[in-house]
Amino acid sequence: MYKITLKKQLSKDIKLMGIEAEHVVKNAKAGNFVILIPHENGERIPLTIYDWDKKTNVVYIIFQEVGVTTAKLGMLNEGDSIFSIAGPLGKHFHVEKFGNVAIVGGGVGVPAIFPIARALKEAGNNVTSIMGFRTKELIILEKEMESVSNKLLTATNDGSQGQKGLVTDVLQGMINSGPKLDLCVAVGPVIMMKAVAELTRNYNIKTIVSLNALMMDGTGMCGGCRVTIGGKNKFSCVDGPDFDGHQVDFNELTSRLGTFKEEEKASLHHSKIQLVGR
Ligand code: NAD
Ligand code: FES
């Protein structure tokens, strides 16, 4: 069992949790993820690692309550324990000095770009982070992202804070005004990562996306996280989650992510859990 040392509400349905897990913290790097099981009979939840503290052995995750299991995770409090946490899983983000880097995060994808921005900045890159949210009330991690970026740009769909529009509008502005980007990283909804990759393809800017494929075991055994990259089968959990955005079959990913939508709805209905804001 793994003790919850911190729980904080970041926006209406997004929570930050700190969990004591020495085995995860020991080897955690930017881009790794964990699979946790809140209760003995609970389902597995894959979550990108947001941060970690080697002094306290606490790993930090940020999650949105989107179904029964994440809602049950959100009901646990400081002092409670989590049944299981496996990790760090996946290949970590490849860090080197690329030059001018744009790191794009959409909504609840922003926690996943935080450690990547930090690692790239520490490696001497000129990091501009772009965060996109539907509206001002949903903005999270503004100060944190500022601290790991040379420049932080924010967009909201309704214009309530930052530039009005989508992250791709901000990215297009950056590309137009220069200097030339050497790397772009994008994490968020599949439709956003697809839009970013389509934009950067026109300018030949290398683009890495982090795929949130369906996952079960997280060790390459079940095949649940299969994605097609450059026409070849890959497993997101062991070959990724980071891939070349210009090679990803985003349409297939979207369709596979929808596989259990009806079952998820039914499970939520039977649980009688009411998700915030839905
Ligand atoms: P959202 O729908 O509120 O979108 C966030 C932002 O993404 C928008 O404000 C906009 O700027 C941008 N965006 C959305 N659609 C776009 C489009 N068509 N073109 C260009 N930009 C677009 O996001 P949300 O509800 O917070 O959901 C976040 C998603 O991120 C979830 O689907 C989750 O599965 C995913 N996620 C992925 C990872 C990962 O590692 N890949 C990690 C965490 C979350
Ligand atoms: Fe089972 Fe990747 S989650 S193979």
Image: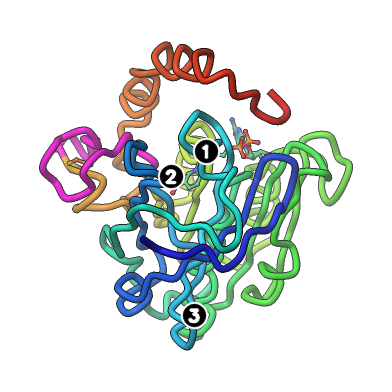
Cα separation between marks 1 and 2: 40 Å
Label 2 residue SS:
helix
Mark 3 vs 1: CB contact within 8 A: no
* Residue kind at label 1, given as amino acid type: Lys
Span of residues in magenta:
211-233
Residue at numbered disc 2: 201
Q: How far across and down, in percent of the image, does residue 237 sit?
A: 24, 49
Residue at numbered disc 3: 53
Cα separation between marks 3 and 2: 37 Å
Residue at numbered disc 1: 72
Look at the image and tell me in which quarter the N terminus lies.
bottom left
Q: Residues within 10 Å of mark 2 (few under 14, many from 20)?
A: some
| Residue 96 colored in magenta in the image | no
Residue in the image at 68% along x and 70% along y:
144
Q: Is mark 2 within 8 Å of ligand 1?
A: no
Label 1 residue SS:
helix
Which of the two residues, 210 or 84, is positioned nearer the viewer here?
84
Q: Residues within 10 Å of mark 3 (few under 14, many from 20)?
A: some
Cα separation between marks 3 and 1: 25 Å
- The mark that comes first in sequence, 1 or 2, is 1
| Outermost right residue | 160
Q: How far across and down, in percent of the image, does residue 239 sit?
A: 20, 52
Residue in the image at 42% along x and 50% along y:
47
| Outermost left residue | 221
Q: Is residue 180 above or below residue 268?
A: below
Mark 1 vs 2: CB contact within 8 A: no
Q: Nearer the viewer, mark 1 or mark 2?
A: 1
Q: Regarding ligand 1, which quadrant of the image does it lie in?
A: top right
Mark 3 vs 2: CB contact within 8 A: no
